């Protein structure tokens, strides 16, 4: 995890960040902003009152709002993180209230289209983006700042995106611990058609093959489970994604079919097939390993500590007296008004107890992991 | 894990088991036989002297042989576990020395063909089989008895397979902790074409798609890694498998293509596609969970304890004095001449230390996990 060097304290880059759509990604971005003290305040905005309640309880955001209004005028960062089909309506809802200097971004998985939409709404500093992160379990309860660490976060500026906005967005992505990669929207869409949407359709087709014969389920071992795991994703979101990107997806399907036909022909050419198998293994083995998946599970709690003497001592003492063992402690950020520290604990139960103890002692919990 | 009930001690079902081909599967079968005391002696037979040396050192087998001979006459169980392309030559090598009463089985992943081969060689009690188990890492060093636990083990008798042989094979599979499933060879081959060989080709085609564009590797996230994991399998073995089963595989490919075409057409019918996505999720979610993959990693050591008083006490004392913590202890089997116990330890290092300590104290280590 990149840790900002402690030293001369500095102001957070943003005064007010608004995360619109507090799901898995939006929630994780909010947690990252709060834990790394990148915004003085983080407001969560969502269509669902329950989600807002949960987000506040979990310390994912500082405050919540359920309706757009003048309060949006103060926002200098707006993250549109609603499900893809709700993005354009959401943008239309918020746009009238945004200040022209606000940095605005989205996290949708298909990029063509959204930029034109935001431009038409008069949003000046919009940088379309797509953090390549996620887990099978959605929702704000599974949001974690660590989800974004070491993730590739694609930014897809158009010819109209101001370079200053791109630059600010790039810095934000890096500050959140992710790796920015910049490319045009169409290039992104073609790439995700190949590495994400085509595999989803192939996976789906495989599940359909086994649906009508129970013996197949019985014999399906680890390899088949691997190949069909993505078919367990949320059907509506998956459907929206592939329909939105269908043009690029059709091209990817055509290329996939050609490769598959060649392999089928090679069933009569064992030497050719061996070469193909060797090449495939080489390629697969060289896929970059995402470091975070190799880390042991962490049981973390992040607390904000005000800029007063001996706050860290007070935290550790409170936990020590309650018999909660602190395995690891790390300063995440230091600002003028205080800092944030990560406590590595031993178990999810300890994380819960520590949260209760420290909240009771007046400390502000900023997320659990 | 099924544990034979302790009680009136009984004789092992087999006097002498020969495992020909001591790789991942052969080695795991040998470990299962030894840990559950299913054979009085287990001999490993392999083309490679290094493999035999390793197998003996790991306690996977009792003895090793490098050439066929009269010693095979005593075998009442023979497991042919060489790579599929070497199976027929291996069978031809051993057949002249086998007694007619010996129960013989193989573990190859394509069943049509091998039965006719063995029959032509005059092997009477041959039951073709295929344990659906394995891991990405091959070789005897990764062999574990637990690999077979809860695995589906398909048995594919032909019309000529004696029912008594099938019955004995079924009992053996259950005694090893696996689940026998019986079906004709052709049915098996069609099923594995769908759940194993087709997915392998699809996976290979996907890797070929990304080989020529580094940006694709960069954007390939968890889903893509899942879908291409099987492409990392041993190229030669994978190639042999799909070539051997090409007839059934072509049928499976044709069905796969039809499903994929339907999904592509549905890109213009979002409601149809949603239904397809929901059906796919339902099917995938209902795939039986293989229990062992959910268990926390175990660090096990199995030792044979002779039938003398206080042996278990001696084992625990030796480890206790050396500071090796025993988390778990389980009796795996009890026979007239002694038993086998599994010790659950805390780490791979503890397993190694415990192995050294107990070997030094005269105990016989029968495998690590």
Image (cartoon, coloured by chain):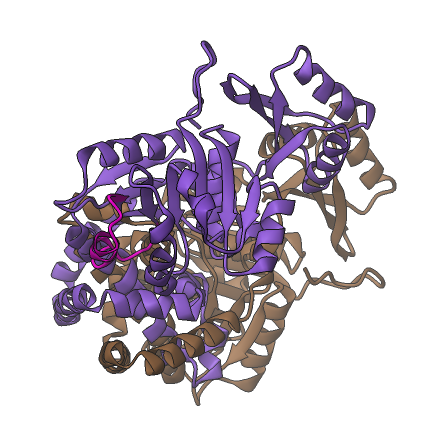
Chain colours: A purple, B brown
**Which residue sits furthest right?**
B309
Q: How many marks?
A: 0
B49 to B248, vertically: above or below: above
Q: Position of residue B153 (x, y in %)?
A: 51, 70
Residue B123 part of the magenta segment: no
Q: Position of residue A298 (x, y in %)?
A: 58, 36
From the viewer's perspective, is A346 left or right of A259? right
Q: Position of residue B178 (x, y in %)?
A: 58, 66
Query: Which residue occupies 58% across, 44% down?
Result: B369
Front-most of A18 and B354? A18
Find the magenta span and give its range.
Answer: A107-126
Query: Which residue occupies 35% across, 46% down?
Result: A98
A284 to A90, vertically: above or below: above
From the viewer's perspective, is B217 left or right of A322? left
Q: Position of residue A188 (x, y in %)?
A: 20, 51
Quarter holding the N terminus of chain A is top left
From the viewer's perspective, is B159 left or right of A369? left
A98 to A237, vertically: above or below: above
Q: Quadrant of residue B355?
A: top right
From the viewer's perspective, is A191 left or right of A351? left
**Which residue sits furthest bottom?**
B159
Is residue B142 something one can see in this rendering?
A: no
Is residue B8 something one can see in this rendering?
A: yes
Quarter holding the C terminus of chain A is top right
Query: Which residue occupies 50% across, 39% down?
Result: A42
Front-most of B300 and B80? B300
């Amino acid at each position: 995890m990149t840790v900002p060097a402690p030293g001369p304290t500095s102001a957070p880059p943003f005064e007010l960040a608004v995360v619109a759509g507090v799901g898995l990604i939006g929630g994780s971005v909010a947690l990252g902003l709060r834990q790394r003290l990148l915004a003085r305040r983080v407001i969560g905005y969502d269509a669902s009152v329950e989600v807002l309640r949960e987000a506040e309880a979990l310390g994912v955001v500082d405050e919540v709002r359920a309706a757009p209004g003048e309060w949006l005028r103060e926002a200098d960062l707006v993250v549109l993180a609603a499900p893809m089909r709700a993005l354009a309506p959401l943008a239309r809802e918020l746009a009238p209230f945004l200040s022209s200097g606000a940095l605005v971004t989205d996290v949708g998985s298909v990029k063509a289209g959204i930029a034109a939409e935001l431009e038409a709404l008069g949003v000046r500093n919009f940088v379309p983006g797509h953090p390549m992160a996620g887990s099978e379990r959605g929702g704000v309860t599974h949001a974690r700042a660590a989800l974004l660490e070491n993730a590739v976060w694609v930014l897809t500026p158009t010819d109209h995106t101001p370079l200053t906005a791109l630059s600010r967005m790039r810095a934000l992505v890096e500050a959140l611990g992710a790796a920015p990669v910049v490319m045009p929207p169409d290039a992104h869409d073609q790439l995700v058609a190949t590495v994400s949407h085509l595999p989803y359709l192939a996976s789906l087709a495989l599940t359909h093959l086994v649906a009508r014969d129970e013996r197949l389920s019985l014999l399906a071992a680890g390899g088949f489970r691997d190949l069909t795991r993505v078919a367990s994703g949320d059907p509506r979101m998956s459907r929206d994604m592939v329909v939105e990107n269908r043009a690029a997806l059709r091209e990817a399907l055509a290329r996939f079919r050609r490769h598959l036909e060649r392999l089928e022909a090679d069933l009569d050419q064992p030497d050719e097939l061996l070469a193909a198998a060797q090449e495939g293994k080489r390629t697969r083995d060289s896929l970059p390993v995402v470091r975070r998946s190799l880390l042991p599970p962490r049981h973390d709690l992040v607390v904000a500590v005000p800029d007063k003497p001996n706050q860290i001592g007070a935290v550790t003492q409170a936990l020590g007296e309650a018999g909660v063992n602190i395995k690891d402690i790390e300063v995440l950020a230091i600002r003028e008004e205080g800092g944030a520290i990560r406590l590595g604990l031993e178990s999810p139960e300890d994380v819960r107890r520590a949260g209760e103890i420290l909240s009771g002692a007046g400390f502000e919990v900023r997320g659990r992991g």
